[in-house]
Amino acid sequence: MKKSMLLLLAGLFSCAAQAAVSGYPVVLVHGFQPDNLQSKPTGAQVSNNGADYWAQYWRDRADERIDWPSQERVADKITSQYVWPKLQQMSRDGTCANGCVFVSHSTGDLVTRYIIDNQALWLQNAGLQPLNIVATFDFAGAGGGVELADLAVNVANGSGLINSTVKLAVSLWLGATPSSSNIGVLNDLRVNTARQLASFPDSRVPRLRFAGAGSDFLGTTGAFLPGEDDGVVASHSSCGAASASSYNSCSRSVAFDGKLTSVNDPNAFMPYHYPMLMSEGYSHNDTIGSSAKDEVTTANNSSAYLNGDNIKFTTYDEKRGWWIFSSRYRVVSNSSRTSMSSLVYQAAN
């Protein structure tokens, strides 16, 4: 009996140790969920959807989640009914007292930016301790807006230049054709709107970026996204560029496939946004999955947290091709058989 109890306690402590990066608790903020526009979840279903969203890799490696419904707006019910209660709970529980790391995906990047910009003031005004967020890991970040959201709003409102190709791209992404009564957070995801939402936060929390350039839609959606994209988000957003434009990489000297060459990259980034991993073979949702999809390269191989700790990726350069047709490529070690999320988790620990 005593041995069984010791094994149980060991298992519990093992799980607790796993649910952290560098000893910091992990807080998950999921992205846009298209089916919410039709189903309009509330209550427990929002939480269930949040758990399912992260099931492949991060759910069992996290300490907290901030779940929210996509049929609402960021600065309205998403914050008042879902974000704010969770922030109060985490402050009272001391979740981030010694530092914590937020992990976001897609629109979660935008929600996280809004949190970072406001949480300290909100909590102080409520007589609570602000969260000590030391870094965020932003996968396929949509904080710079999504051109497909602009198209979706135009389709829903019957405005702009709408044709069958536009409707096809929007329906592939959303799973249905939107109407004016069910666009919710898509309003916040429009490029100009997203870039104006908490665009210059006072907080200096480092936003570490992990981007892909694959697609699940056979390139159909990519026709409406400038530069490289992951099928949903263009690289100007996933890289954290200061302006929306057509970019082919998050780095001026490394392409998404790792080739060392001159590339059209952002010449400036949003405040405290630092691109790190890139891969040509990862689509929007692949970045938070558990399967390796392609080799991964680095825009930057290391970055510091707010408190001075850092995360670093080991890379090597190799020559591919023959004679004058050869090129050099930069590859993250073990990335051909390790998922992007797992590479981040391992490096952080």
Image (tube, helix red, strand yellow):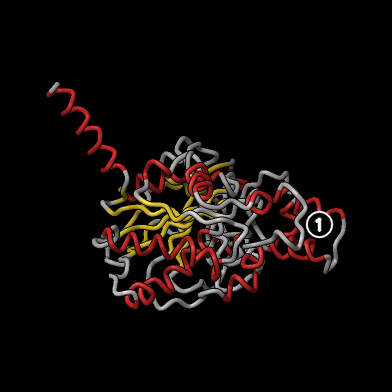
Q: Position of residue 203 (x, y in %)?
A: 38, 74
| Residue that lies at the very extreme toward the right in this rendered image | 163
Q: Which one is nearer the viewer's eye here, 270 or 257?
A: 270
| Residue that lies at the very extreme toward the front in this rendered image | 43
**Label total for image:** 1
Asked if one can make out residue 225 in the rendered structure from this viewpoint, the answer is no
Give the side of residue 57 with respect to residue 191, left or right. Answer: left
| Residue drawn 56% across the image and 59% down it | 107
Give the side of residue 299 with respect to residue 223, left or right. Answer: left
| Residue drawn 55% across the image and 44% down it | 286
Q: Position of residue 79 (x, y in %)?
A: 49, 66
Q: Which one is nearer the viewer's eye here, 286 or 267?
A: 286
Give the side of residue 107 with respect to residue 155, left or right. Answer: left
| Residue that lies at the very extreme toward the left in this rendered image | 2
Disc 1 marks a residue whose amino acid type is Val
Q: For residue 77, which quarter of the picture?
A: bottom right
Q: For residue 130, which quarter of the picture?
A: bottom left
What residue sits right under mark 1 in the picture? 166
Q: Position of residue 29 (x, y in %)?
A: 46, 55
Q: Secondary structure at mark 1?
A: helix
Q: Mark 1: few, some, or many residues within 10 Å (few <14, many ≥20)?
A: many
Q: Is residue 39 above or below residue 60?
A: below
Q: Position of residue 253 (x, y in %)?
A: 53, 61
Assign the N terminus to one quadrant of the image.
top left
| Residue drawn 42% across the image and 69% down it | 116
Asked if one can make out residue 101 in the rendered structure from this viewpoint, the answer is yes
Q: Is residue 215 above or below residue 201?
A: above
| Residue drawn 48% across the image and 78% down it | 200
